Image (cartoon, helix red, strand yellow):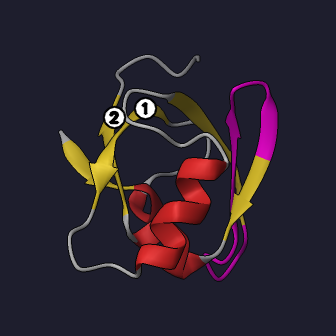
Amino acid sequence: MTSVLRDMAVGDSGRVSGFLEGGPSAYRRKLLALGLTKGTAFRVTRVAPLGDPVEIVVRGFSLSLRRDEADIVLVQCDTAKEV
C-alpha cells in the first residue's frame, strides 16, 4: 500500500517509493541529500502531538521532518515493524 510519510504512526516501517509530483523541488533535493532515496528503509520513531515534526530512523541516524516535507514523501508500508 502506497501512502505518504505523514500518515504513518509511531512504530510503522516502510520504504521510500518516490516523491509527489508538483511538490517543491527544494524539499525533494534536500530529502535526497539526506539519504531518502527510492527503496531506502526507515522506521517512524516519534510524531509530535500536532503531527509536526515526524522523526524517522533511516540509514542508522534519526531524521526529523517538518509536515510539508513528510507530505511529499511517498512510502510503501511494511507489514513488519522492524527495519
| Residue pictured at 44% horizontal, 16% vertical | 80
| Residue pictured at 17% horizontal, 39% vertical | 1
* 59 sits to left or right of 62: left
Mark 2–mark 1 Cα distance, whole angstroms, equals 4 Å
Query: Which label number is shown at residue 30?
Result: none
Query: Which label number is shown at residue 14?
Result: 1
Please provide percent x and percent y for residue 51. 60, 75
Q: Earlier in the sequence, mark 2 or mark 1?
A: 1
Please provide percent x and percent y for residue 14. 43, 32
Magenta span contains residue 50: yes
* 20 sits to left or right of 27: left
Q: Nearer the viewer, residue 25 or 63?
A: 25
Please provide percent x and percent y for residue 75. 34, 44
Label 1 CA crowd tier, 10 Å (few <14, some 14–19, many 20+):
many
Tell me whether the residue at label 2 lies in contact with that at label 1, contact meaning CB atoms closer than 8 angstroms. yes
Q: Amino acid at mark 1?
A: Gly
* 62 sits to left or right of 37: right
| Residue pictured at 64% horizontal, 75% vertical | 66
Q: Which residues are magenta?
A: 48-62
Q: Residue at label 2?
A: 77
Q: Secondary structure at mark 2?
A: strand
Q: Nearer the viewer, residue 12 or 56?
A: 56
